[in-house]
Amino acid sequence: MKKRKNQAKTLSVWIVLILILMMLKFFADGNSPSEQTFTIKELMKAAANDSILSLNIRNDPNGGANWYEVNGYIQNPRFGKEDAPADTPRKLPFKFSGTILEDNYQILTSPTAPWTISEKSAGSVWSNVFFTFLPGLLIVGVIFFLISRQMRASSKMGMDFGKSRARLLSPDKDRTTFDDVAGCDEAKEEVAEIVDFLRTPEKFRKIGAKIPKGILMMGPPGTGKTLLARAIAGEANVPFYSISGSDFMEMFVGVGAARVRDMFEQARKNAPCLIFIDEIDAVGRQRGAGMGGGHDEREQTLNSLLTEMDGFDGHEGIIIIAATNRPDVLDSALLRPGRFDRQVVIDTPDAKGREEILKIHARKIKLDESVDLEKVARLCPGCSGADLANLLNEGAITAARRNSPTVSMEDINIARDKVFFGRERRRLMDDDQKKLIAYHEAGHALTQCALDDNNMPVHKVTIIPRGQSLGSTMFLPKRDTLTESKTSLLNQICSTLGGRVAEEVVFGEVTNGAASDIKQATKIARKMICDWGMGSLGPIALGENQEHIFLGKEIARDRHFSEKTAQQIDDEIKGIIDFQENRARELLTKKRAQLDLMSQALIEFETIDGDLVKDIVFEKVKTLDEIKEILAKKEAKKESQAQEQTMAKNPQAFENPAATQA
């Protein structure tokens, strides 16, 4: 708004300048020389009346015959009259050039030829001077105006460094409510109290309750922290300022602290209000951790933020909401009561929460009747809200690619495999490579199905390359896994090593295709010994992990034990790996026939589902022909279901086939 006012002011100044110049030009034209036309006959009459005051005749300087230039002054006929202005000149100059014949000193040629007589007023001299210097003055004025404006803009820009970058969000634009948030019911209840206080503060004040000054929302990326903050703004219907932690930082020292002060100053003018600081870990990290010490720019900004949140001045009516996925790096002074009184953890949703999230994102997507969102939710364990939104969007893109009016369950399955395991890469492989990959994936699927089919059943096995892998064995847990037993972890190690063992059993040697499997198995075994106390060393924490609090990414491990203990840890890990490798070898050798049949099915069809894997492992299917028959029946059933859905949508087309063909 302020910028528009400045632009209007500048435009009005230019309009006034243009009007002044037009007026000056008008008056100058009124005082400019007026030209009158006289003929030779009239000049001769003036000569007879003795009105010619002076006359000069000049010959042609180039020597031309009968060419003359005549000039002089004639008596002004208006001079001395009562209606004439006071500055009326007595004489008027005249000038003529051309061919003249002389006879007894009389001018005989062209008696009607025009003579130009110029009448100059007294003000014409000042007008000439004015318009002579006007362009230069105008240019100097414009340059001075532009330079001064640039200096003011530079000065303003320098002062704007200390201005807050917080954006005041409009509650009417893209309003988000609690109905748009799902999968975090406990967190919604926590922040709903804030909304209730802003709407009816008297209810809390009557019993002496104070609303929390700050709420810190913590959780993995994509779980809906920012979305929940927007929902609070939409429900509370109060001014809502949004800013990112990185917006406080600049290359100039002191700018961050100035922006914090300016942000709270603006908020006090609009209290009660909400301030949302996204990614607060960018400015709220532990002090003293860097090289700058107390004079570090980030620490100055944090000190200013701490003072504004709970200093002598206070901030009555200002509620601060912050979001981060790195609460482990935040300064302890920022987390104490009086600043961020309430810490709300927003974790990945469970199966029910994922279903509710899918329903919200499915509002804008045309889903087919075959889509079962409950099953889709079970297919996506550990997914965040952002992952689920991306899954449905990829399903819609897949449906649009094949020109389908709705998104089917098959589109969702294709999108899931693409998002979780990568896009299919049709690579040309010879028979030996295809056979090796088929036995490797069959080894994974067979060991998992035989050992732990109840908790982690096989969903799909494929030898089509996806992402970085040449084949994939996909599992579908029946429930969300919160804790795992020692038996389940050992079964995971055995299944992970099953692909490498299958290569050894069938081909007599191993390849480097099991590199990621070996890393995964070793990681599980190390955690069992060092973190979970599942080895012979007992329940002792051996070393401290420096890892991401939510993502679980191990950065480093501090060793607080002796070399002897380290050797025991290595022996324990190797013992677990060796035992599970031998266990997988015994199982695959015992079920070699099932391993061969599953590999043949993968070579023939490239992809088989979990039901078929289960039938092969438990010997319900014993030949490749039986597998072909089962797959043919499934394909026929799928086509029949598609036809039934088409009939339900357009029954007239099937009642009158001729009309459809026409």
Image (cartoon, rainbow, N blue to C red):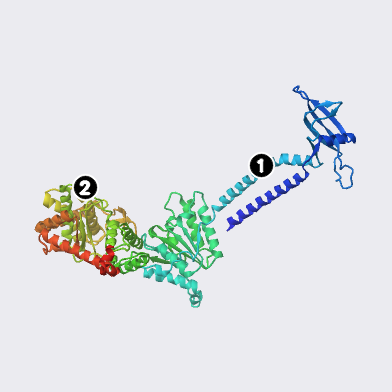
Q: Residues within 10 Å of mark 2 (few under 14, many from 20)?
A: few
Q: Position of residue 615 (x, y in %)?
A: 14, 63
Whether residue 64 is visible, yes or no, is: yes
Q: Could you tell me which residue is drawn at 51 percent across and 58 percent down?
A: 260
- The foreground one among 350 and 67 is 67
Q: Element at badge 1?
A: helix
The image shows residue 98, relative to residue 379, as above or below, that is above
Amino acid at the residue labelled 1: Ile
Under circle 2, the secondary element is: loop
200 and 118: which one is in front?
118
Q: Tell me the kind of residue under disc 2.
A: Leu
Quadrant where the N terminus is found in the figure: bottom right
Determine which quarter of the picture holds residue 73.
top right
Q: Judge from the rendering whether residue 194 lies leftward or rightward of residue 65; answer left or right.
A: left
Residue 373 locus on image (x, y percent): 30, 67
Seen in the image, is 572 located left or right of residue 101? left
What x and y, as percent, mark residue 203?
49, 77
Foreground residue, 577 or 17? 17
How much space separates mark 2 and mark 1, taking CA atoms? 74 Å
Q: Label 1 neighbourhood size at 10 Å, few (<14), some (14-19), many (20+)?
A: few
Vertical placement of residue 620 versus 438, above or below: below
Q: Which residue is mark 1?
A: 139
- Asked where in the image residue 141 lies, by quadrant, the reply is top right
User: Residue 481: in sight, yes or no?
Assistant: no
Instruction: Please report contact status of discs 2 and 1: CB closer than 8 Å, yes or no.
Output: no
The quadrant of the rendering that contains the C terminus is bottom left
Residue 428: image tag: 2
Residue at 80 percent across and 30 percent down: it is 109
x and y percentages locating residue 281 in the rendered image: 42, 57
Q: Earlier in the sequence, mark 2 or mark 1?
A: 1
